[in-house]
Amino acid sequence: MITRVAVETGFIELLTRLIAESDGGDPPIQRTGKDLTCSEPTLGKWLDDCDFPFLMETLALPDDVFCQQFPGIRLSQEDRKAFAGLLEKHSTECARCHAQKTEAIEWAMRVDKAFAENKQTIGDLLINADEI
């Protein structure tokens, strides 16, 4: 019997393989900032806990979508924009967070590339998952 967990695991394994294959000659992502100390740990925690591109996209959501997805967080779009600017500035000034942001963006680009190059394969897996 194939379970939802098995399907999700299969999807993750496929995605991992496709990303590795699409990297081609790309060098491995360097973890240069892991041994550095964050200059503003309160801000750095946000970058530790959230993928930078995802965090920026989330903070940029329209108010209605943000409120629906995060009903317990009361931040206006203006407040979120200011917070995103603060995180952006911090990730430029702090060596640790700059390295972490760079790694997250590089990883997101590799995932996007793997999806773009393998739409049919990924689509087929998702369609077949519904039949299981």
Image: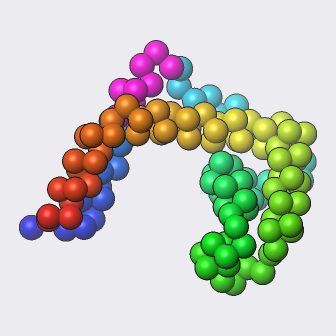
Nearest the viewer among 42 and 18 is 18
Q: Is residue 20 magenta?
A: yes
Q: Is residue 60 left or right of residue 16?
A: right
Q: Position of residue 19 (x, y in %)?
A: 40, 34
The reply to whether residue 90 is in sight is yes
Q: Position of residue 87 (x, y in %)?
A: 83, 52
Quadrant of the frame with the C terminus: bottom left
Question: Which secondary structure class fits the magenta region best?
Answer: helix
In the rendered image, the residue lying farthest to the left is 1
Name the quadrant containing residue 86: bottom right
Quadrant of the frame with the N terminus: bottom left
Q: Is residue 58 left or right of residue 12?
A: right
Q: Look at the picture and state if 55 lies above or below 114.
A: below
At 33% from the left and 40% from the top, the residue drawn is 119
Q: Is residue 51 left or right of residue 42?
A: left
Name the quadrant containing residue 17: top left
Q: Is residue 8 magenta?
A: no
In the rendered image, the residue lying farthest to the top is 25
Q: Is residue 6 left or right of residue 84?
A: left
Q: Look at the picture and state if 103 lies above or below 9.
A: above
At 67% from the left and 76% from the top, the residue drawn is 64
Q: Position of residue 80 (x, y in %)?
A: 81, 65
Nearest the viewer among 73 and 3 is 73
The residue range painted magenta reads 18-26
The reply to whether residue 36 is in sight is no
Q: Position of residue 35 (x, y in %)?
A: 74, 38
Colouring scheme applied when the structure was drawn: rainbow
Q: Look at the picture and state if 62 lies above or below 112.
A: below
At 78% from the left and 43% from the top, the residue drawn is 97
